[in-house]
Image (tube, grey):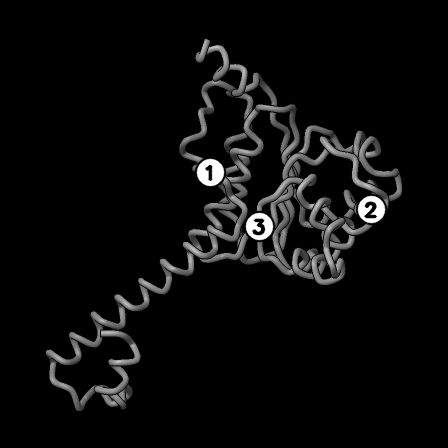
Amino acid sequence: MTLHELWKSYRYLSDLESYSPDERAFLEKFLSGEHDLRERKKREYLLRTSGIKRIKLLTDFDRTFNPKIPREKIMEFMKTDWLKKPCNLVLIGPSGVGKTHVSSAMCYDAVTKGKQTVFLSLFDLTAKLTKARSTYSLIDYYARIPVLCLDEVGYVMPTRENADHLFQIISKRGEVGTTIVTTNLVPSQWGKVFDSVTASAILDRLSMNGTFLTFEGRSYRNRKNNRSE
C-alpha cells in the first residue's frame, strides 16, 4: 500500500479515536515505515549529489600512523553545533596526511544527518565557474549549500575572476552554512595562489567563527605504495 492508497481508506487521520486498536497500530507502523523510507531516499539522493567519491568514516582513520594528527580537536569540533550554526574549518598540512579523509568523512556525516552537502576541489570549482552559463546562479548555489567542502586549495592558481568568485561564495556563506577547506598552505602562503588583497579577504571571512587545524606527519599514500611493493 502506498501513501496515496492509504489516504483513500483513511480520510480523517486526525480522528484516531474512531479507529480500533488494530487500525491505530497499523497506521503507526505504516506511517513510521513511510517516514523511514523517505528519509533513506533523501539520504541516498544527498549522497549522490554531494560529490563524495568514496565513503570514508572518521573511525576508519589510522591515527597511530600519524599520532600528531589533532584527533581530539577534530572530535571536539564534531561535538559542536557545526551542522546548525554556520562556522568555518580549515585543515592545513602537506599532501597525504589525511586532510581529505577527515573532511570527506565529515561531509558524509552531514549527509547521514540529512544536510545537503557539496564536496569538491578548488580545481573543479574553478572549472565549473569558468563553464557556467550563469556565474551568478552558480555562486548563489554554492553560497546557500548548508555544508560546503573545498578540497585542495593551493594546488591550482585560479584566475583573478575566479578568485573573486570564490571570495563571493565564502563571504555570502558567512551567515548561511558551514565551510570546510583543506589546503597545503599556511595562511601566510595564500598569496602564492591568490593576490594579496583577495587572500587576505578570504582568510578574514574564514576566520569568522573559524577553526584552523594543522596536520603533520608522514604521508599515508607513501605507506600504501610501500606496502604494494
Q: CA distance from mark 2 to mark 3?
A: 23 Å
Q: Quadrant of the N terminus?
A: bottom left
Q: Residue furthest top?
A: 229
Q: Nearer the viewer, residue 105 or 7?
A: 7
Give the left or right position of residue 86, taking residue 8 as reference.
right
Q: Which mark is residue 54?
A: 1
Give the left or right position of residue 224, taking residue 208 as reference.
left
Give the left or right position of residue 134, taking residue 77 as reference.
right
Q: CA distance from mark 3 to mark 1?
A: 13 Å
Q: Which mark is residue 166?
A: none
Q: Which mark is residue 118?
A: 3
- For image coordinates 24% across by 80% down, the residue present is 6
Query: What residue sits right under mark 2 in the picture?
Result: 201
Q: Quadrant of residue 4?
A: bottom left
Tag 2–tag 1 contact (CB < 8 Å): no
- For image coordinates 55% across by 39% down, the residue present is 103
Question: Callout 1: helix, strand or loop?
Answer: loop
Residue 45 to residue 229: above or below: below
Badge 1 crowding class, 10 Å Cα cut-off, few under 14, some 14 to 19, many 20 or more, is few
Residue 140 to residue 194: above or below: below
User: What amino acid does circle 3 point to?
Assistant: Val
Q: Nearer the viewer, mark 2 or mark 1?
A: 1
- For image coordinates 49% across by 50% down, the residue present is 110
Question: Callout 3: helix, strand or loop?
Answer: strand
Of callouts 3 and 1, the N-terminal one:
1
User: What amino acid does circle 1 point to?
Assistant: Arg
